[in-house]
Image (tube, rainbow, N blue to C red):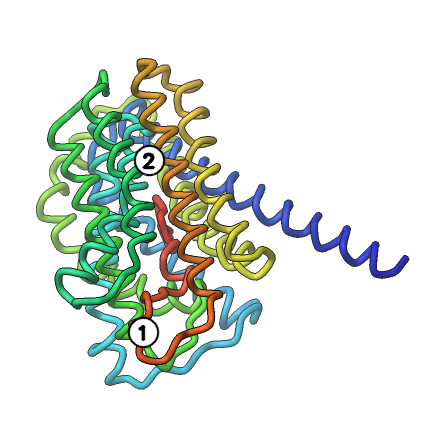
Amino acid sequence: MEEGLVCQWSVFRSLLAILQWWAFNVTVIIMNKWIFQNLDFKFPLSVSCIHFICSAIGGYVVIHVLKLKPLISVDPGDRWRRIFPMSFVFCINIVLGNVSLRYIPVSFMQTIKSFTPATTVLLQWLVWRKYFEWRIWASLIPIVGGILLTSVTELSFNMFGFFAALFGCLATSTKTILAESLLHGYKFDSINTVYYMAPFATMILAIPAMLLEGNGILEWLSNHPHPWSALIIIFSSGVLAFCLNFSIFYVIHSTTAVTFNVAGNLKVAVAVLVSWLIFRNPISYLNAVGCGVTLVGCTFYGYVRNMLSQQPQVPGTPRTPRTPRMMELLPLVNDKLDDKV
C-alpha cells in the first residue's frame, strides 16, 4: 500500500514538475514575442540584458538569502578561464534567440531551435573528432528533413530571423560542448550556473545594449502611450526567465532522462500551439507537417542517445559522447536546451 502511494506521488510530482516547466517556458517565449510585436519594444539586446540582470539577482536571492540551494564554490581563476567563455557563448545564444523572435513567428523559431541536436553532433564530429554510432546519424535525418520542409513552406519567412535562430543553435551547441569540457570537475546545477554566468553575461552585454539601443529606448519612452506599464511587463519577463531556470532544476530532479526529452519536445509543440492561438500567424499544412517531423526526430534522437548510454562499454570501442542534460537545456529566454533561461 505504501509503495503504491509512493509511486503515485512520484508520478504526480513528475507531472507537476513538467507542467510548471511548460508554463514558465511558454509564458516567457510568448511574453518576449509580445514585447517585440505588441509593445513595439524592438530592442533584443536590452531585453536580453534585463533578463540577465533579473537572473543574477534571482540566483543571489535563492542561494544567499533563501538558502534553497548551496553555493558551489569555484576557484576565482576558474571563473575567468572556464565560466567567462561559457557566459560569452551563453550571451550570444540568448541574444540570437531574442533577435529571431523579433523577425519570425514563435512556431518557426521553436522549430529551428529543435535543430540543436544536429548542430551539436556536427560540431563534436568536425571540431573535436568525436565518434558517433550510425544510429545517432540516422536519428538526425528526420530532424534535418523536418527543418528543411518547415523552412521552405514558412509563410512568414524572414532571412535575418532565420539565420539568427540557426546561429543560435550553433551557439547552444557550442555552450553544451564547452560545458562538458570547461566545467569538468564542477557538478553545477541550473541555479549555480545562472548565479555564475548571469553577472558575466550582463557585463558583456550592457555596453553594446546602451551604445546600439540607448537612443532608441529613450525615443520609445517618449512616444509610447503607457511606458511604465510596458516596462513592468518587460521586467516581469525577466523575473519569469529566472523562474524558468529554477523550474528546469526541479524537472531534472523529478523525471528520468527519457521523460525529460519527450516532455521537452512536447513543450515545443505546446509553445507552437499557444503562440498560434495568440498571434494567429499563418501556418500551412506542410509547415505543420515539417514541425511535427522535426519534433518526432528530436524525440527519436533522445531515445537513441539514452539507449546507447545504457549499453555496457565494449573494451576498445569508441564511446558516443554524452552531455549532461542539465547543460543541454539551460535557457534564459528560449530553450533547447538546454536549455535556455
**Residue 283, how many percent across, how many down?**
32, 16
Quarter of the N terminus within the rendering: bottom right
Per the image, label 2 sits on a secondary structure element best described as: helix
Relative placement, left or right, of 144 versus 189 is left
Relative placement, left or right, of 326 versus 249 is left
Q: Residue at x 44, y 31 (%)?
A: 269
Quick check: 26 above or below 123? above
Residues at circles 2 and 1 in contact by the CB criterion of under 8 Å: no
In this view, the residue farthest toward the left is 211
Residue 233 figure quarter: top left
Q: Which mark is residue 130?
A: none
Residue 42 figure quarter: top left
Quick check: 273 above or below 198? above
Answer whether residue 335 is visible to the viewer in this image: yes
Q: How busy is the neighbourhood of tag 2: few (under 14 within 10 Å), some, or many (20 plus)? A: many
Answer whether residue 221 is visible to the viewer in this image: no
In front of the other: 179 or 143: 143
Per the image, label 1 sits on a secondary structure element best described as: loop
Q: As shown in the figure, which amino acid type bears the numbered disc 1?
A: Thr
Q: Which mark is residue 317?
A: 1
Work out how far the residue at label 2 is from the one at label 1, CA to CA, in angstroms. Answer: 36 Å
In this view, the residue farthest toward the right is 1
Q: Residue at x 77, y 51 (%)?
A: 8
Quick check: 135 above or below 203? above
**Residue 185, how many percent across, how many down?**
37, 82
Residue located beneath label 2 in the image: 110
**Numbered circles on residues, count:** 2
Q: As shown in the figure, which amino acid type bears the numbered disc 2?
A: Gln
**Residue 244, how many percent across, how many down?**
46, 49
Q: Residue at x 34, y 28 (%)?
A: 291
**Residue 278, how many percent across, how many down?**
42, 19
Disc 2 vs disc 1: which is toward the camera?
A: 1
